[in-house]
Amino acid sequence: MMLASAGVYAFPPYYGGSPASNVIIDDFSAPNQSVLVSPFTTGTFTNQAATPPGVSIGDNRDLAVYQPTAVGNFTILSVFPSQMAMSQTTGSDATFYATWDGSNAVTTPTANQPGGGPGVNTHGLDDGIGLPGYDLTSNGINNGILIELLSVEAPANQITVSLEIFDYAGGSHTASYTYLGTDVPVYHFFTFEDFGYATGYDVQPGEGPINAGAIQMVMNGTPNSDGNFGAVLATQIPVPAPLALIGVGLLGLGATRRRPS
């Protein structure tokens, strides 16, 4: 039995799912990578890195930071072993992008230069079809995408994450969630229905999570909010055992009530 909607968990539920069907979008295990906006500058900065097979989907990850307002400190998005970290200073209104499109087309632009060249937008996405119709469901087993958040600095801060799936037919679907300040890992699960796909993912050729052409994760935080992410993967999430037991108990209660007196 599957969950009917997205949920937040205080434990890594993918350990109890179907590991063989997991599609690792990124586990941030390698390589080290960073992109930053220097103090008192604005614009989009992009950085592309190939990754070893299995570390990220399409074996490629693009990072970008867009800082519309000059601030007095660095704004950074970086990957180092086992996590991706976003960091911004007081007054920053940056947007951070991690893109998996299987493309090496992104080059590093100079300050205030939008994009990285022909066919590349300002956020590191190439053409949206670098992943040739990748099946995120693993033949219908996986029912959504899990994001592991390791921490958000300070209780008053928050980070909104939007995850967008670009399909091979040229369309895209987005799901979003806002994480509050925490110093313990939080696992948020987006079902494919949360992206707007029909139950069962019955879609036209080239569309849907069975035909992913690119995936982009967009992060916006309150000023001075730092966040760390541990993994992004498509997986299968079963109903947590306590909820399943409650459901069985309710069924038993209903049967008891129907028993003739």
Image (cartoon, helix red, strand yellow):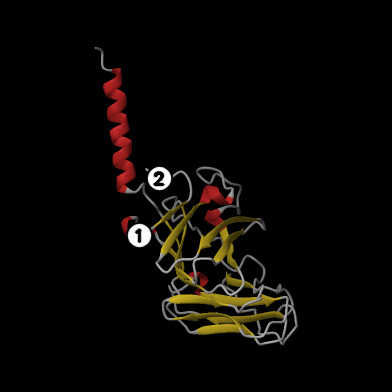
Q: Nearer the viewer, residue 232 or 246?
A: 246
Are circles 2 and 1 on residues that touch, CB within 8 Å? no
Image height check: is 59 above or below 259? below
Q: Position of residue 59 (x, y in %)?
A: 50, 75
Estimate the spatial distance between the alpha carbons at disc 2 and disc 1, rounded to whole Å.
17 Å
Mark 1, secondary structure of its residue:
loop
Residue in view at x 31 percent, y 56 percent: 16
Mark 2, secondary structure of its residue:
loop
N-terminal label among 2 and 1: 2
Q: Residues within 10 Å of mark 1 (few under 14, many from 20)?
A: few
Can you tell which mark lies on residue 256? none
Q: Given the current orientation, which residue lies at the most extreme left position?
A: 261
Q: Position of residue 83 (x, y in %)?
A: 45, 75
Q: Given the current orientation, which residue lies at the most extreme front position?
A: 156
Residue in view at x 71 percent, y 74 percent: 122
Q: Residues within 10 Å of mark 2 (few under 14, many from 20)?
A: few
Q: Position of residue 188 (x, y in %)?
A: 46, 58
* Residue ID for mark 1: 11
The answer to whether 46 appears left or right of 33 in the picture is right
The answer to whether 109 appears left or right of 26 in the picture is right
Which of the two marks, 2 or 1, is nearer to us in this view?
1
Image height check: is 120 above or below 38? above
Q: Nearer the viewer, residue 219 or 88?
A: 88
Residue in view at x 52 percent, y 84 percent: 33
The answer to whether 146 appears left or right of 217 in the picture is left
Q: Nearer the viewer, residue 8 or 163?
A: 8
Which quadrant of the rendered structure holds the N terminus? Answer: top left
* Amino acid on which the number 2 mark rests in the picture: Met
* Amino acid on which the number 1 mark rests in the picture: Phe
- Residue 212 quadrant: bottom right
* Residue ID for mark 2: 2
